[in-house]
Amino acid sequence: MTTPVLRRTLAEKLAPHSGHRRLLSLDGGGIRGVITIQVLKRIESLLRAELSAGSDFRLCHYFDYVAGTSTGAILAACIAWGMSADEMDSFYRTSGEEMFKKAGLLDAIMKHGYDAWPLTQRLRQVFAFDGEPITLGSDRLRSLLLMVMHNVTSDSPWPVTNNPSAKYNQRGGPGRTSTSSNLDLPLWQLVRASTAAPTYFPPERITMAGRTHVFADGGITPFNNPAFQLFLEATLDPYRLLWPSGKDKLLIVSVGTGTFPHVIPKIEKSNPNKLESALAAIDSLMNSAVHFQDLLCRAFGHCRFGDWIDREVGTLAENAFGSLPFGVPKGTGERLFTYVRYDLELTAGGLEEVGCKHVAPSDVQKLDATDQIIALGEVGEGLAKKVDPSHFQGFLS
């Protein structure tokens, strides 16, 4: 017997109701998505037990809105498609190395390190029904879905959603003909666009309303961690979903893929070369974006759990400082949502904390470390132990 808290269809999630909403946000991070999956397996198992749900329980039955960037977009789409966490784990472990197939020598030197074709084929196979690719607007998706990509054509971040009320999902809307809508775009292609990491994969070209746009990985936008953008998409007037905010009305669960400082070797003694500077800048910007989005969520939300952000602000967990930045007093219902964050530092100290001191940090930091999937799984299992039923209190009925 299933519990009423479970909303199994997209229509049920869109229907107005007085209950609370549950949102899930998944960071980018390449093959380090294996870490995320272990946390998702723990959440799925815990919720199945807490809700007395059957063996067919999936995360899409609990979460109303799922967001992801890059590898997080793959996982978010898998969840909305109805895959179990075990199925996602199997997908990454069996296909990870295949999807990171080395490009030809000339492309590898001049353009990108990996061939997009194997990844494209796998995404087309996964997001299909009866052999035909499903679209973003497919009624077979079980939850609202948000994916972030970078539109190279306009040099702007593009959060794309299957919210039927969204501006660019309207036929005949701005820049649309009477028959065109973002909901008609193939889901696999949008996922591929969100994962087109510069220097790793070539960009993805998508034709919309007669114009071709070039897309790159959403990780190079400010939303490699899309948690706060997910909150805005759910509540802000222009996004047309208009869910009520409040710490008893919205739960946002955010899962990272691990962070680490990108320190240029011997920087104290010599100036870095151009390549070192470029690579360090990309990693540093992505890391900074992840931390800033996390800080926004903790500042405006009621943070139940999360590791330290830095030595100055600590964790901000359980409203340690009692008010929003504008001085609204504690206890007046001013918090905009309840927030939980699972992530770790992929450093010697961070790995030791999750019981993986035998894992070398350098082995699990790369986006393309497909030869370290077993180690990444162990790290994820260690992080998953931090998931606790109390983090979901108040959102289980």
Image (cartoon, rainbow, N blue to C red):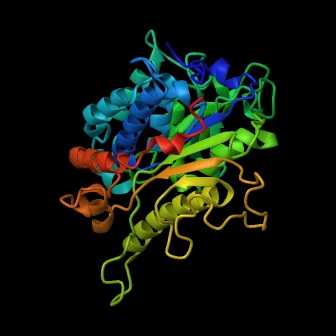
**Where is residue 327 shown, x and y percent of the image?**
78, 68
**Where is residue 213 shown, x and y percent of the image?**
61, 40
Residue under the image location 78 percent in, 35 percent down: 240
For this orientation, the residue located farthest to the left is 358
- Residue 381 appears in the figure: yes
**70 or 318: nearer the viewer:** 318
Tell me: 204 left or right of 90.
right
**261 or 308: nearer the viewer:** 308
**Where is residue 212 shown, x and y percent of the image?**
62, 36
**Where is residue 312 shown, x and y percent of the image?**
54, 76
Q: Where on the picture, by quarter, is residue 261?
A: bottom left
Q: Is residue 85 above or below residue 216?
A: above
Residue under the image location 60 percent in, 29 percent down: 397
Q: Is residue 4 above or below residue 297?
A: above
Q: Where on the picture, by quarter, is residue 365?
A: bottom left
Count of residue discs? 0
**293 or 276: nearer the viewer:** 293
Q: Is residue 5 above or below residue 236?
A: above
**258 or 176: nearer the viewer:** 258
Q: Is residue 111 above or below residue 125?
A: below
For this orientation, the residue located farthest to the bottom is 269
Tell me: 353 left or right of 227.
left
- Residue 195 appears in the figure: no
Residue under the image location 46 percent in, 20 percent down: 53
